[in-house]
Amino acid sequence: MKARGCGLLFVLAVTCAGNAWCESAPAVKAPQGEKGQKVTVVGCPSDGQTGPVAVPDAAELAKWTPKLPQATAQKLAYYRSADIGVLAPRGWHCFGLYGSNGSMLIVAPEALDANDFFGAAPRPLTGPAVQVAISDGDTSGRFEVARIAARLFPKRMDLVQAVIDEGAPASDYPTGPFAGDIIKHRDGKKVVFETPADREGMGTMSRLQKNAAPIDGVAMLAGDNALMMVARVPKEFRRFFPVMVGHLSARP
């Protein structure tokens, strides 16, 4: 994960207009006459290569907080670390990670802290969780970018070939979607997928481990960088996944 201060190479907006990451996400509009309601915002602490990072201040959080139809806003909250923001079910907890290859934000029903992710035995995510990870193709994040490109972006095999030319084994970068995964949308920059219950797939190419619930996911490329969000949420929240995609945010 990328060291803070080096600057990631992409910027996401709270709306999808002109946004390379989510420009084709379904629009979410308030009913006619309804202005929309700001969702509850939750600041997330982070830790990583250069030490702990505090929760963003109120002014910073306010800049990124989206407005949603009232019925949706009452179900979701906006979780924001110093680098990444994502919608997820209200009442959950969040923690950010960063390092030389990029940044990550994890949101889950239970409290999270650095002890869950650092050390000899990092805590697996075996239950409901949302993970957003951004990988920087100019650093060691290029290996994760290549793994994503090999699986989902056949027109960007140049990213895969570049790491193989460095000496990485080609066998580490199998091509084509996982056999069980369901590809729901694909274009040149974004792939929306589902990893079924009890299956390995793109959804488990993360900190989430397989269980009896499916994992919804989206992977995006912008230049040589990648973003992937995976979400295993209670059944009644799965319908909000397009909203979550449309309101992803990340900044340098």
Image (cartoon, grey):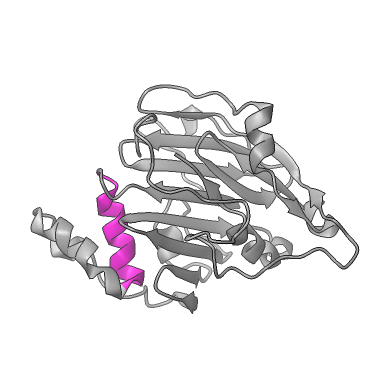
Closer to the camera in the image, 178 or 156: 156
**Is 21 above or below relative to 90?**
below
On screen, residue 163 versus residue 214, left or right, reads left
Answer whether residue 126 is visible to the viewer in this image. Answer: no
Where in the figure is residue 30, as x and y percent of width and height?
81, 63
Q: Which residues are magenta?
A: 140-153
Identify the residue at image location x=50%, y=56%: 229
Q: Is residue 151 magenta?
A: yes
Where in the figure is residue 9, as x and y percent of width and height?
37, 46
- Which secondary structure dominates the residues rendered in magenta? helix
**Is 27 above or below relative to 13?**
below
Closer to the camera in the image, 83 or 206: 83
How many numbered tags mark residues here?
A: 0
Closer to the camera in the image, 55 or 37: 37
Where in the figure is residue 221, as x and y percent of width and height?
39, 61
Kindly give the residue lying farthest to the front in the view shown. 18
Where in the figure is residue 81, as x and y percent of width and height?
55, 36
On screen, residue 59 versus residue 98, left or right, reads right
Kindly give the residue lying farthest to the right in the view shown. 33
Q: Quadrant of the N terminus?
A: top left
Q: Is residue 249 magenta?
A: no
**Is 100 above or below relative to 14?**
above
Q: Quadrant of residue 54?
A: top right
Answer whether residue 4 is visible to the viewer in this image. Answer: yes
Closer to the camera in the image, 101 or 222: 222
Identify the residue at image location x=48%, y=53%: 208
Q: Quadrant of the C terminus?
A: top left
